[in-house]
Amino acid sequence: MEASDNHLHIISFNVPWPADYGGVIDVFYKIKALAEAGVKVHLHCYQYGRSVAKELDKYCHKVYYYKRRIFRDPIFSKLPYIVGSRNTSALLENLLQDNYPILFEGMHCCYYLAHPALAERYKVVRMHNIEHTYYRSLAKVEKNPFKKYFFEKEAARLKKFESVLNHANAIAAISPADTELLASKYKNVFYLPVFHAHDEVKAIPGKGKFALYHGNLGVGENNEAALFLVKEVFSKSEYPLVIAGNNPSPELVKAAEENKNIEIRTKITTEEIDELIRKAHVNVLPTFQSTGMKLKLINVLFQGRHILANSKMVHNTGVEELCAVVNTPEQFRQAIKDLDKINFTEKMAWNRQLLLQDYFINYRNIQLLTQKIFSPVR
């Protein structure tokens, strides 16, 4: 079959434009790569805090929008809230208008994965995380008692619901570690690296004057990482740290204000964060939960100078050798001192490009996906 004859339904958990946070970045640039490969994408979006996006019309054969159902009481449902709130009969009706294969973006979108009407369809699930592990990690760092209970409840529901993946013909995991874990339980699991905005490494040779941590600071795990850097690392160092991201917690703001070398930049755009990534001498990336693939890591690999991360950020990602990997506060401080003495060079950028092009080039990875969908070994 010619590529131009290939049609694919994609069910997205949110409107994937603007492509300005982890999950939607993967969705949007996957759609873009599919369109460039000649695939006619029928995109189905659940709307949640986002408007109709004309940008998607450039890459999609057709775009459908559905309102996400927001429950007043998210606790007592038997289904995971992220699944049950993405449930509309209009989606099923639209999927049944033809016999094209279907790509489900995340567990969020799998409400109809096991539906008898779709039993004969070729179905692929893109796993953005091991969701029950991710939600359990959110519960661990959440301070609000109600939210903490919700995350724990959601983790339990997601763990039970995960068996729905037995109804998928293939499962596209986002990291080698997730691939290994999912393959121990399900059939036809394959590694499909994350899709992103970059074609080549554009890190600027030379030296910056500060370290950078960036992310949505309203997310519990990012808040925890930023607090770790402030309280455990940079409060005991004179090296400048910029924390860039929106919705910082009062605790983080207060902790940063107590240190002259630490600055929080909020109400900041994606473009402004990208500029900071390029200007920083060291991009500092600790995390305390290890499932999935952090888009911020990919972003700094293509744009930033030195990268300082902990083991949970880079373990079994394939890019460990491109980062300085440390774990204790003392190791972070010493590594920053060491990296401050090293200018970033064109050779370093080239070596990074050579490794990244083996795993994280969109046009290569889309060939893998289209082969799985349109020429599967059954």
Image (tube, helix red, strand yellow):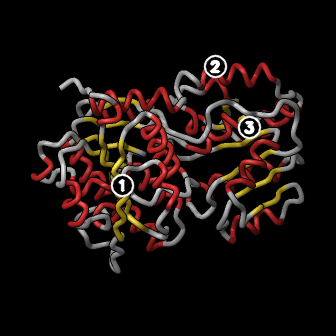
What's the CA distance linking mark 3 and mark 1?
A: 36 Å
Point out the frontmost of discs 1 and 2: 1
Decide if residue 11 is on the left or right side of residue 163: right
Q: Which residue lies under the disc numbered 3?
A: 304
Point out the frontmost of discs 3 and 1: 1
Instruction: Check whether the beta carbons of the residues at disc 1 and disc 2 lie within 8 A of each other.
Output: no
Q: How dense is the environment of label 1, judged by Cα within 10 Å: few (below 14), some, or many (20 and up)? A: some
Q: Which residue lies under the disc numbered 2?
A: 354
Instruction: Check whether the beta carbons of the residues at disc 3 and disc 2 lie within 8 A of each other.
Output: no
Q: How dense is the environment of label 3, judged by Cα within 10 Å: few (below 14), some, or many (20 and up)? A: many
Decide if residue 174 is on the left or right side of residue 222: left
Residue at x 18%, y 45% (from the top left corner): 99
Precedes in sequence: disc 1 or disc 2: 1
Decide if residue 198 is on the left or right side of residue 209: left
Residue at x 70%, y 30% (from the top left corner): 324
On the image, which quarter does residue 329 sit in?
Answer: top right
What's the CA distance linking mark 1 and mark 2?
A: 37 Å
Q: Which residue lies under the disc numbered 1?
A: 62
Most extreme residue toward the bottom is 72
On the image, which quarter does residue 90 sit in?
Answer: bottom left
User: Which quarter of the figure is the N terminus placed in?
Assistant: top left
Q: Is disc 1 placed on a helix, strand or loop?
A: strand
Precedes in sequence: disc 3 or disc 1: 1
The residue type indicated by label 3 comes to Gly
Q: Is disc 2 placed on a helix, strand or loop?
A: helix
> In the image shown, does 324 or 171 lie closer to the viewer?
171
The percent position of residue 86, horizontal first and vertical second, equals: 31, 64
The percent position of residue 234, horizontal first and vertical second, equals: 80, 49
Residue at x 63%, y 37% (from the top left corner): 310
User: Which quarter of the figure is the C terminus placed in?
Assistant: top left
**Residue 189, above or below 348:** below
